[in-house]
Image (tube, helix red, strand yellow):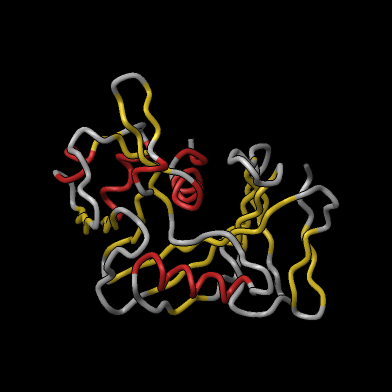
Amino acid sequence: MTLDIITTDGRLLLLEDSDFDISTGLLVKYNEYHVFVVHNPDRWVVNGHIKEAAVVGVGGKLEPGETVLDCVKRECKEEINTDVRISDSEVTYVVTDEYINKFTLGGAEKPRPYYIIELKGREPGRKPYIVVFSYKGEIYEEPNPGDVSAILLARESALHHLMCGPTTVKFMKEQPVKFIERIHLPDDLHLIPCGTLLTYLKLKYWHKK
């Protein structure tokens, strides 16, 4: 799949006839912390004796009749129980498994996304590809987990540990992070960066190698 982007009448268009679902993501800051969420136990993966949980940016699938920005704001309320101020991005990165391109979407409606990510659909009932519009944003009150198992508040210096491979909850609690748990996270639960968080780590660390 080749993902081509144009802008017209202030809107982003994906020039692609292949089937894809639209989702959203957020790179949220709360004071000095990055804000990410941990998937619920029904989505944890068991590999032998190891349990793995995805850590992702706030966000989710676009609902019928919903705009991308409406979806971002709704998901923020549902997942971390707070409103978000979405920031405009002068540069947008289009990220796929094959390439990373950088665009200036000058004619697009603001706020413009920071990432447009192409993912292969892996969940039953979803289309072959998922396109994720990810934005930067800020929140001004402490988040509380809604329909997620926990919130991870992480300082920048702690994020590189997630880049190096699966890390446990116990290990991350020894770093400059805070967990706000709705559901108890076992100390031996492995945390796997996915989606918007994984893209952030790729561009910040892996892509520089």
Q: Nearer the viewer, residue 190 or 28?
A: 190
Report the front residue among 115 and 169: 169
Where residue 85 sits in the image (x, y, percent)? Answer: 44, 79
Q: Identify the image quadrant of the N terminus.
A: top right
Residue 138 locus on image (x, y percent): 39, 74
User: Most extreme residue toward the left, as rendered?
Assistant: 174
Quick check: 5 above or below 161? below
Q: How many marks?
A: 0
Task: State the image quarter where residue 150 is shown.
Answer: bottom left
Residue 6 locus on image (x, y percent): 80, 65
Q: Report the side of 208 relative to 13 (left or right).
A: left
In the figure, 47 relative to 59: above or below?
Answer: above
Judge from the rendering whether residue 46 lies leftward or rightward of residue 73; answer left or right: left
The residue sitting at 65% across, 44% down in the picture is: 125
- Residue 133 sits above or below residue 106 on the image: above
Q: Nearer the viewer, residue 189 or 91?
A: 189
Q: Residue at x 81, y 80 (%)?
A: 9
> In x, y percent, where is residue 76?
43, 70
For image coordinates 70% across by 70% down, the residue present is 105
